[in-house]
Amino acid sequence: MLKDITLGQYFPGDTVAHRLDPRTKILLVTLYIVALFSADGLLSYAVMCACLVVSVRLARVPPRAMVRGLRPVLFIIIFTAVLNLFFTPGEQEFFRFGFLAVTDTGIKTAVFMVLRIMLLIMGTFLMTYTTSPISLTDALENLLGGLKRFRVPVHELAMMMSIALRFIPTLIEETDKIMSAQKARGADLENGNLIQRAKAMIPILVPLFVSAFRRADELATAMECRCYHGGEGRTRLHVLRYARRDYNALTIGGVICVLVFVLGRFGL
Amino acid sequence: MESILQIRHLTHTYSIGTPFERDAVKDISFEVGRGEFLGIIGHTGSGKSTLIQHLNGLLRPTEGQVLLDGKDIWADPKQIRDVRFRVGLVFQYPEYQLFEETVYKDIAFGPTNQGKRGAELDRCVRDAARLVGLREDQLDKSPFELSGGQKRRAALAGVLAMEPDVLILDEPTAGLDPAGRENLMENIRAYHREQGKTILLVSHSMDEIARNVDRILVIKSARILMDGTPPEVFSRSEELLSAGLDIPHAARIAAALRQRGVPIPPAVYTVDALEREILRLRKEAASC
Amino acid sequence: MSVMLQAESVRFAYPVSEGREAVPALDGVTVAVERGTFTVVFGHNGSGKSTFAKMCNAVLVPDEGTVSVEGMDTRDDTLLLSIRQRVGMVFQNPDNQIVANVVEEDVAFAPENLGVPTDEIRARVDASLDAVGMREFVTHAPHLLSGGQKQRIAIAGVLAMCPDCIVLDEATAMLDPMGRREVLSTVRRLNREQGITVLLITHHMNEAEDADRVIVMDDGRVVMDGTPKEVFSRVEQLRDTGLTVPETVELLDRLCQDGMPLPLDALSVDECADVIADALSRKG
C-alpha cells in the first residue's frame, strides 16, 4: 500500500534528538555523510554504525520503523550488492562463471557499499523522523539565507517545500482512493506488459492532476485570505536559536567525522 | 428472502505488527437479501468504509469470509475482478474519479474492462446514463464541463453501466444542495424499483435512510450495534443518540411530543407517519 | 448598531472564454450586515451565495456597485491587508486551507504574515486554539484529524488575525453530522462570547435555527431577508427556489393544510412539539 511509504514522515517526541536545533541536525547529517564517504575499513564502518545506533536510541525511534524506511530502496541496495559482488576484480577468486567472478575484494566492496547506502538512508531518515518538516524547511531557509543576496528566492523555495511536504500525505491518501475507485470499475493495475501498465495509469493520473490543480488553486486563495504576501515583513512563531546542546552535538559530530576520516585514510 | 451476500465473522486489522495496529472491522456477520434496500449508518471512523470495501473484494479480510451467491469471493483470487463487476461500489465524491475525454467514454470504462464491445457496450452506457438522468447531448461533453451534480451522476452511471447485481453507494448525496439530493435519491429509488437490484446505502443523513431503506445496519466502533427494520432501529432512539448518532428529525419531534404527554407510538420516524398519527389523535379527541 | 459589511447594488460575472455569454453570478445585491450579528445565507448551488461570500474580503471585487468592510472599499488595493485581517474566511474543503504540517504552525500562519511579534503570536495561537476547543492538539499533524476538527483548526487560523467578522463559505458541506455540530457550536459561541460577526453560507436549512437573520439567494439576487421565523414560514416561496424547509416547519405546514390551524414559525423541535401538543389538548 502507498500508505506505507515513510519518506519524510515525522514521529513527534521530546527527546534530545527532537530538541536539537534543526540547523544542527542538518549540519550533523552533512558531517555524517562526509564521514560515511571517507570510511574505508572495518573499524571506521563500526564507528559509523555505532553513531547511528546511539542516535536511534537517543531519538527513541522504533528500530522497525528504521528498517521499514529501507524498503523502497531495497532494489537499489540489491542491485549495488550484485554489481559489486560480481564485477570487482580481486586477488583471490572464489568462483567464476564466464565474466562473472566473486573475489575477496568483491565481497568486501559489496558489503561496504551496502552498508554505506543503508547507513546513509537510515541516517537521513532519522533526521526526518525527529524533525518536523516545517522546522527542516525553516532551517534550510535560514542556512541558505545568504543566497538571497544572489537573488535566489530562498523564502519562496522554502514555502514551496513546506507546502509540498504538507500535501504528501493528502495526495497519497487521494491516490489510494482513486486507485480503489478505478479498481472498483475493473481497472487492472497489476497485470500486463509495460505499455499496458503505463496505459492503466491514465485513469489514476488524470484525476490526480485535476485534483492537485484544484487543491493548489483553493490553497492559494486560502493563503491570500490569511494575508500571505510573500516573505517580506514576515515574523515567525518559532525563532531558531542555538542552545548549549547544539554546540555540544556539533563538537562531538565534528570530532567523530575527523576520526573516521583519519581511520579511512589508513584503510581501517 | 434468499441471500445474495453473506458476511461471516469478518475482521479487518490495519497495520499489523506496527504500533498503529487496530481493528477497523471486528467479527461482523450479516446477510443481505436479493433485492433488498439496506441502509448502513455509523459515524466517520466506525469501520463502515472498511466494511463496504470488503464486499467487492477491494480489501481482503484478515479473518472471516464474504460470500456472493454462496461462494467465497476469495476462493480464487484471480477471479476477484469478476466480483467487482457484480458488486458495484460507488465511492464518496465519485466525481473525482472521472478522467476520460467525454462522459460517454468515462461511463464506458467499466463495461469495457468487463469485455463488453459494440452494440452491447453502447446499450449499457446509454441505459446507465438514462437511469441517472443524464441527457443524450451531455454524453459527448467533457466530464469537466458538467456541473457538480451532473458529474456525480456521470460517475454513478460509470458503475451502473457494469450492470452489477449489488450496488453499494457511499454517501451518494454528500455536498449536494437539497434539490440535488432529492433528485438523485429519486433516481436511485427508481433504479431499485425498476431493476429490483440489491442496494446498500451508506449515509449520514438519518432522514435519507428513514425515507428509503427496508432494513438498517448500525455500525459502531468496528462492530454491529443494531440490525433491524427502520421502525425497530428508530424506536431505540435513546441508544442511537448515546452512540453519538443522529435520529430523523420526525423522530425527534415525536419524542418531544411524547414528553408532553401526546401518545405517539415509538415506531414513528417520518414526517408522513407523524402527520397521520397527529391527525388520528385529533380525530379521536374530537369524537369523544 | 454599526455596519460591518455593506454591499451596494453589486453586479458580478465570472470571466468566460470568448464567444460565450457571461452569466451574472450576482445581479444587483444590496445587503448590510450589522456588527455582532449571526447571519445565515441560503441558496441552491449556483444561486450566487458563494460568490457573495468571496466579495466580503476582496477575494472577488464587484464589476459594478461597491462592497465595503467597515467603510473600506474592497476595490482599494492599499486596504487589502486590513480588509482581510478584519474579515476571515473559512472554506468548504478542510484539506485545502491548512498550510502547515503542525496545528500550531498553521494557526500561526496569518499572524506571521501580518508581522506580529513572536511572543504575541504564541499568545494568539494559544487563545485561538482555546476558543475552538483544540488546545490539546497543538502539536498534532492536521491530516490525521477528523473533518470537524480540521475546520475548527481553520477557524482558529482565522481567529489568530483577531478579525471582527468570520465568513464560512459552505464550511459545513463536507462534514458528517458530528463535525457539523462541532463547527456550528464553535461559531455560535464565538458570536455570543466574543461578539464576532458571523456570516454562514450553507444549504443545510437546520443550521439557521438560532440565527439572527436569514438571507435567501436565487439567481444572483436576494429573494428573502428576515428573521428565521419570518423566512421559514414562507414555505411555498422557499420550495420555489429549490430549497426545503426544516422538518418542523414541514410538519406544521402539512397539518395546516389538513385543517389544523397552527402557526408556522415554531422552528425548534421543542417549540414545534409545544404548538402541536397545545392544539391537540385544546381540541380535547
Image (tube, coloured by chain):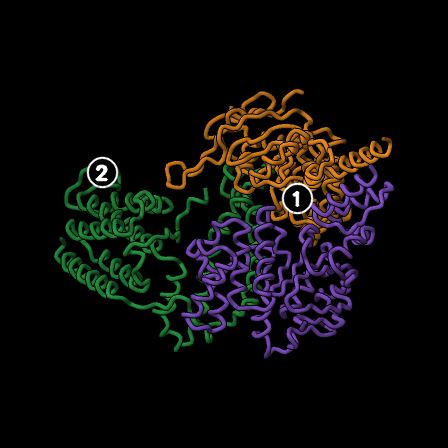
Q: In this view, does B20 lie to the left or right of C7?
A: left
A120 displayed left or right of B161:
left
Name the mark on residue C157.
none
The foreground one among C100 and B55 is C100
Q: Where is residue C146 in the image (x, y as percent from the top left)?
A: 52, 49
The residue sitting at 55% across, 61% down in the picture is: A219
**Is residue A240 placed above or below C137 in the rendered structure?**
below
Residue named by callout 2:
A96
Inspect this view and state whether residue B31 appears: yes
Question: Camera-side residue: B131 or A129?
Answer: A129
Q: What residue type is labelled 1?
A: Ala
Chain identifier matching the purple colour in the rendered picture: C
Query: Where's the C terminus of chain B, which quadrant?
Result: top right
Side of A248 where A11 appears, left or right: right
Mark sitting on residue B155:
1
Q: What percent of the width, then of the height, locates residue C1? A: 68, 72
Residue found 25% across the figure and 43% down from its top: A86
Q: In this view, does C26 lie above or below B55?
A: below
Mark pair 1, 2: CA separation? 60 Å
Is B256 or B252 nearer to us in this picture? B256
